[in-house]
Amino acid sequence: MSHDQNFKNLILDYPRQAIEFAAASEAARLGDDVRILPLREEQLKERLGERFRELDVPLLLEWPDGHRQALLFVFEEETEPGRFSIHRLIHYCVDIAELYQTERVVPVVIFLHPG
């Protein structure tokens, strides 16, 4: 099993702790009533011929208050910093915001190797 997969499994098994570690200022606003839901890694395509986008570990946070605004964290873990594309991350964030109808996306990028 790769380091990438181990990292993904840790986030999925301990999502609240992962948010506390990677986005402490966001975690401070989470109450016990916030639901943390893992989302599918493959994003939907508008046309069959398009290439698909795959996120590493997207998490959706939902508050049970009246308007149910959702907050989305995208853990985009890259093994090699040189392969990281801010443009690709922007596309991921916009696509997810549209799909889950949220205006708030918090991208968290984690590099496992120095670059």
Image (tube, helix red, strand yellow):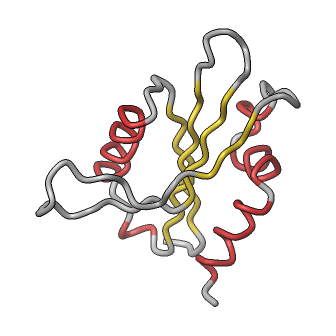
Residue nearest the observer in this picture, 114 or 85: 85
Query: Given the current orientation, which residue lies at the most extreme left position?
Result: 49
Residue found at x 63% / y 81%:
3
Q: Measured from the top left, where is residue 15 in percent x and y?
A: 75, 52
Q: Measured from the top left, where is residue 83 in percent x and y?
A: 36, 69
Q: Is residue 7 left or right of residue 32?
A: left
Q: Measured from the top left, where is residue 107 in percent x and y?
A: 52, 43
Q: Measured from the top left, where is residue 24 in percent x and y?
A: 76, 38
Residue nearest the observer in this picture, 48 or 10: 48
Locate residue 57: give its quadrant: bottom right
Residue 67's place in the image compared with 93, above or below, is above
Locate residue 20: give its quadrant: top right
- Count all numbered tags in the image, as a single digit: 0
Residue nearest the observer in this picture, 39 or 24: 39
Residue found at x 54% / y 63%:
77
Give the quarter of the figure containing the N terminus: bottom right
Q: Is residue 43 left or right of residue 78?
A: left
Residue found at x 14% / y 53%:
47
Query: Given the current orientation, which residue lies at the most extreme top position?
Result: 66
Query: Given the current orientation, which residue lies at the most extreme right position?
Result: 32
Residue nearest the observer in this picture, 79 or 12: 12
Locate residue 48: give its quadrant: bottom left
Residue 103's place in the image compared with 81, above or below, is above
Q: Is residue 86 left or right of residue 6?
A: left
Residue 76's place in the image compared with 91, above or below, is below
Q: Is residue 6 left or right of residue 44?
A: right
Residue 95's place in the image compared with 82, above or below, is above
